[in-house]
Image (spheres, rainbow, N blue to C red):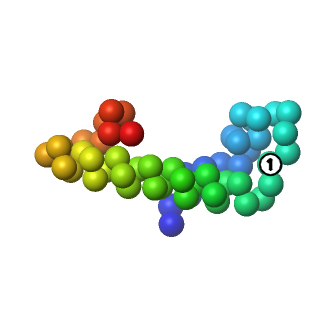
Amino acid sequence: MVDLIIKSKIKAAVPDLSVAGDVPEALNKKVLELLDAASKRAKLNGRRTLQARDL
């Protein structure tokens, strides 16, 4: 699995909250699922470039 999420960046995004140790892994999983679905959409549309509209 590719790590796309950095815990310190999550903490910076929600400075008024503590961030549990399992949050980065769960968020990373969600992002990978989103990217997988978006890449399938791009391929179905005959493109080799992932675009914002695929998200």
Q: Quadrant of the C terminus?
A: top left
**Is 1 rendered above or below residue 12?**
below
Q: Residue at x 33, y 33 (%)?
A: 53
Residue at which label 1 appears? 19
Residue 52 x/y as whole percent:
36, 33
Q: In this orientation, which residue lies closer to the viewer: 4 or 25?
A: 25
**Is 51 rendered above or below residue 2?**
above
Q: Is residue 31 left or right of residue 26?
A: left
Q: Quadrant of residue 13?
A: top right
Under circle 1, the secondary element is: loop
Residue 3 x/y as whole percent:
56, 58
Q: Quadrant of residue 28?
A: bottom right
**Is 3 rendered above or below residue 50?**
below
Residue 9 x/y as whole percent:
69, 40
Q: Residues within 10 Å of mark 1 (few under 14, many from 20)?
A: some
Q: Residue at x 63, y 57 (%)?
A: 26
Q: Residue at x 76, y 35 (%)?
A: 14
